[in-house]
Amino acid sequence: MRVLVCVKRVPAPGARIVLNEDRRSIDTALLGFAVSPHEECAVEEGVRIVEQHGGSVTVLTLGPPEAEEQIRAAFAVGVHAGARIEAGPEDPDPVATARAIASAVQGLEGAAGPFDLILFGNESADSGGYQVGIRVAHALGRPIVSGIKAIEIDDGAMTVQRPTPQGAEVYELPLPAAVAVREGINLPRYPTLKTRLSAKKTPIELVTTDAAEGGQRMIELVPPPEDTSSVQILGDGPEAAAAVVDVVEQLVSL
Amino acid sequence: MSAFVFLVEHDRGAIAETTLGGLRAAREVAAAARLDLHAAIPGTSGDALADEVATHGPAGIHLLHHELLDDYGPDAWAAGASQLADSLGATAVAATGTDRGNEVLAHLAAVRDEAMVANCLTVSVGADAWEMTRVRWGGSLHERSSLTGDLKLLTFAPHAREPEPVGAGDASTATFTPTLDAVHATTVVRDRTETAAGVTLATAPVVVSGGRGVGSAEGFAPLEALAARLGGVVGCSRVVTNNGWRPHSDQVGQTGTVVAPDLYIACGISGAVQHWVGMMNAKHVLAINTDAQAPMVTKADWAVVGDLETIVPAILAEIDRRHG
Ligand SMILES: Cc1cc2nc3c(=O)[nH]c(=O)nc-3n(C[C@H](O)[C@H](O)[C@H](O)COP(=O)(O)OP(=O)(O)OC[C@H]3O[C@@H](n4cnc5c(N)ncnc54)[C@H](O)[C@@H]3O)c2cc1C
């Protein structure tokens, strides 16, 4: 099995999101960076599939040079190869992003053979456009299902499950195929010191594309209305229990 | 007048809770754009929804009939909506931004090579471009975007608008049979598994939620007891699922479940934005935290400052004392 996982580097804000003055980006001076938990799980799933069925896992990202940090994090948990599509500090729109990824995938496949499975996160943590994986799959002529929390591969066929409030929907896809996964499909492993060190040495391929934009333009980012409610402190420690039950009794019949 | 198509979401005849709110948003945008609103209902199992949909103001209702639409499939639904849009000369297609709504519109966008804007809160119609505010970061940030294209594709954030029936309505109802083939069949639901019914995290009236401050899997026992006593369920933060203390199905937040209970009790949860967007629609929030400055405390309605390990059992004891 050859598996490809697509990830996106995003800032990891804490209690508040602070915008830069241009209102087109987040102030990341004090922030770390990560990939979405969905994509962390996609990486883990790719590694597990290859552990079970043999083969190799490649990670692909579109982003600035700093995004190689996220590729190296994937190397440290078992990914074999990595490629980065050169991009500026500002995100391209979803159409251009998907075109660039599809063209990069074709390049990677031309060099080393087709991918049996392409994994995406269900939606990026920051822009949340819910479409890049689906566009890439269509451009490559492969089926894709989103929102997946279980994958089983058996003899060239794949069964995947998407949770619903009542249970789960089951889909069957022939390989090659693509899947957009959700956090919870697995519990990602932690890297070890040894894998972290060796991850520093794995080369990362650089891909350049010139993908045309689509019809969506970001104008500016807008903080949502602030929550203005003010908290009522019911007390300190266990002595506050009576005050708690007083308010709970108004909401719940006990 | 040209047409605006809204895709009505249902699961084998059961209407999706947020679809009629989206239909109302679509009606308002269609009116502003001087487009006739048409509702598309995929699959014969959706036929029975036509009367209810008619009261929400579409000019036409289209029952999409094809055996590949009998159950859900993103490619089949997208192709059905796309072909209907063509037959009506539509210039816009929308749905509510649920799992299915976003998925189908993205397939439609990919096939048509058009832009698609997910989870819009407001849309203002211009001569050429439309301008929208949309949800980013699961709701902790908004974005203003513009959209151009011959076929404008968008989803409305769930609950961006609430349903508003406009009376009996005189919508014409017609059957539309799209041309679907094996490619569309590939992604149709093949089977289902059912889990035991009961109160689910998404719909529970009370959620007793624990974060890093709970300290261990065993530490959730008092939270379980409190949730049971209040007719609710246990939720948790991502730190908790990452540590393996609770299954991911208990996680509240941007990459977990979005909840809107009457009462959300946050025990030892700091209130990071990714958690907050999962429970910000709770009607009442009670925070229990050692840190009086934690965002969850300052944003809550009520808070108790202190160690949850002693406070939660004390609350349980007080309930027992009063109610036996
Ligand atoms: C893209 C992305 C998506 C994410 N999605 C989610 C998501 O869906 N859900 C989610 O929850 N997080 C999510 N996160 C993680 C999120 O950013 C936070 O890391 C996480 O919510 C913190 O969990 P916590 O509040 O339990 O832990 P902490 O932030 O460590 O807070 C622990 C709190 O417990 C208090 N405490 C400690 N001991 C006690 C005690 N004995 N009694 C009372 N209080 C005590 C502390 O004062 C503190 O406030 C996401 C992050 C990213 C980057």
Image (tube, grey):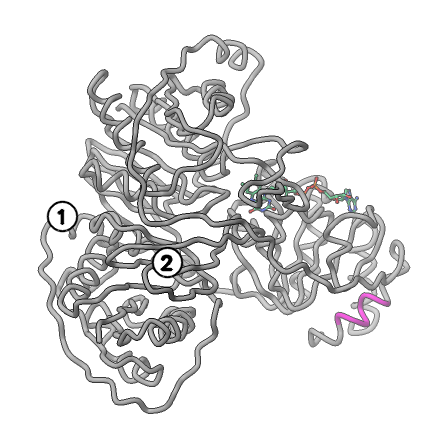
| Residue A222 placement, left or right of A150 | right
Disc 2 residue type?
A: Glu
- Residue that numbered label 1 is attached to: B183
Density class for disc 1 (Cα within 10 Å; few <14, some 14-19, many ≥20) is few
> How much space separates mark 2 and mark 1, taking CA atoms?
27 Å
Does the stretch in magenta take in A244?
yes
- The C terminus of chain B - image quarter: bottom right
For the residues bearing labels 2 and 1, Cβ distance under 8 angstroms: no
Q: Is residue A168 left or right of residue B41?
A: right
Which residues fall within the magenta stretch?
A: A243-248
Q: Give the residue displayed 60% in from the left and 60% down from the top.
A: B233
Q: In the image, residue B222 lies at what x, y percent?
A: 72, 53
Q: Which residue is mark 2?
A: B194
Nearest the viewer among B321 and A235 is A235
Sequence order check, earlier mark of 2 and 1: 1
SS assignment at label 2: strand
Q: Residue at x 9, y 60 (%)?
A: B179
